[in-house]
Image (cartoon, helix red, strand yellow):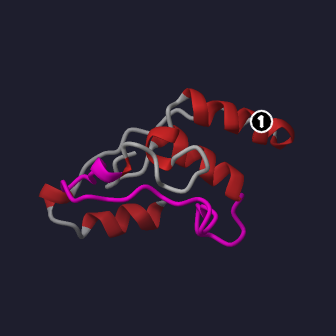
Amino acid sequence: MALIAILKSFAPKKFRRSATPIAMPAAPKKGALVARGHAAYLRLGCTRCHGTSGGGDGPSAKSRRDGHGRLTPPYDFRSMPLKRPAAPDADPVLGIYKSIVTGLSGTAM
């Protein structure tokens, strides 16, 4: 953490900002994640962009824009599994959970 503070000190003041930590609820147990995930996918309206089969072909897919206003197609879960975080020793389920809870910067999510 000390190294991060030192590196941040090199940035011009206009780029320095304090981030407020996001309160993360405890991740659910892996045993029932698939059924709960599917129910949440439907309940949260993920089908509008990602489609019912996760192909990125939902009814709103062609109108989604990123943080810069550019058209951005939704992720196609069928073509490649979502990999987050990128660290090889990190828990991918927890990474996906965090992505859904916090959203993805620069995307329509």
In the rendering, at what x and y percent does residue 56 appear?
A: 48, 55
The correct choice, above or below, for 44 with respect to 7 in the image is: above
Outermost top residue? 43
Q: Is residue 1 magenta?
A: no
Magenta region, mostly helix, strand or loop? Answer: loop
Residue 74 lies in the magenta stretch? yes
In terms of depth relative to the viewer, which is nearer, 66 or 91?
66
Residue 92 on image: x %, y %: 69, 58
Residue lying farthest to the right in this orientation: 31
Count of numbered marks: 1
Q: Of 62 and 35, which appears nearest the observer? A: 62
- Which residue is at a point 59% across and 59% down the rendered structure image? 77
When asked about the image quadrant of residue 10, the answer is bottom left
- Residue 23: horizontal and vertical position, in percent? 52, 32
Asked if residue 42 is positioned above or below residue 3 in the image, the reply reads above
Q: From which residue to which does the magenta span run?
A: 62-91
Instruction: Tell me the crowding category of disc 1: few under 14, some 14 to 19, or many 20 or more residues within 10 angstroms, Cα based.
Output: few
* Residue visible at 35% across and 67% down in the picture: 6
- Determine which residue is flagged by label 1: 35
* Image position, residue 31 (x, y; %): 87, 40
